[in-house]
Amino acid sequence: MVVERVQALAHGGLQELPDQFIRPAHERPENSKAIDGVTVPVISLSQPHDVVVDEITRACSEWGFFLLTDHDVSPAAIQRLKEVGEEFFNLPQKEKESYANDPSSGRFDGYGTKMTRNHDEKVRIS
């Protein structure tokens, strides 16, 4: 079974969301509004290694993401990374698919999702 990519679905005149993207009501977030005083974890690499590891572990398990500071990656390199990512996602779908991962063959690197184990499983996009 071919896995449809979210971008292809979005640009293909989608009339109805496929079931694989619809989570049961009891699994959906209750509130998507910002909460005053709650901010994304900010982690500085200037701290001792064990502190950084603990903070990243906590941020990943509680939030799923974080902002990393004091990493010495130049603003130019960050900008170029954004540009390369945008260039890739602007490629025709067929070309992006040539870089697709294929977990069934043991190839987990590449374009696509690693969030599901089979094609019938609900896709986690949050």
Image: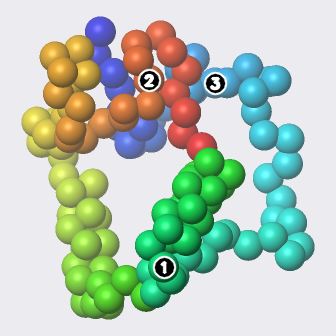
Kindly state the secondary structure of the residue where label 3 is placed: loop
Residue that mark 2 sits on: 116
Dot 2: few (<14), some (14–19), or many (≥20) neighbours within 10 Å? few
Residue pictured at 63% horizontal, 24% vertical? 22
Q: Position of residue 30 (x, y in %)?
A: 86, 41
Can you see residue 2? yes
The amino acid at mark 3 is: Ile
Q: Position of residue 48 (x, y in %)?
A: 48, 79
Q: Where is 55 relative to 76, above or below?
A: above
The quadrant in which the N terminus is found is: top left
Side (left or right) of 24 relative to 17: right
Marks 1 and 2 in Cβ contact (< 8 Å): no
Q: CA distance from mark 3 to mark 2?
A: 14 Å
Task: Name the mark on residue 48.
Answer: 1
Judging depth in this view, the residue of 38 and 55 nearest the camera is 55
Kindly state the secondary structure of the residue where label 1 is placed: loop
Can you see residue 12? no
Q: Name the front one of labels 3 and 2.
A: 2
Residue that mark 3 sits on: 22
Q: Position of residue 78 (x, y in %)?
A: 30, 80
The amino acid at mark 2 is: Thr
Residue pictured at 60% horizontal, 43% vertical? 126
Q: Earlier in the sequence, mark 1 or mark 3?
A: 3
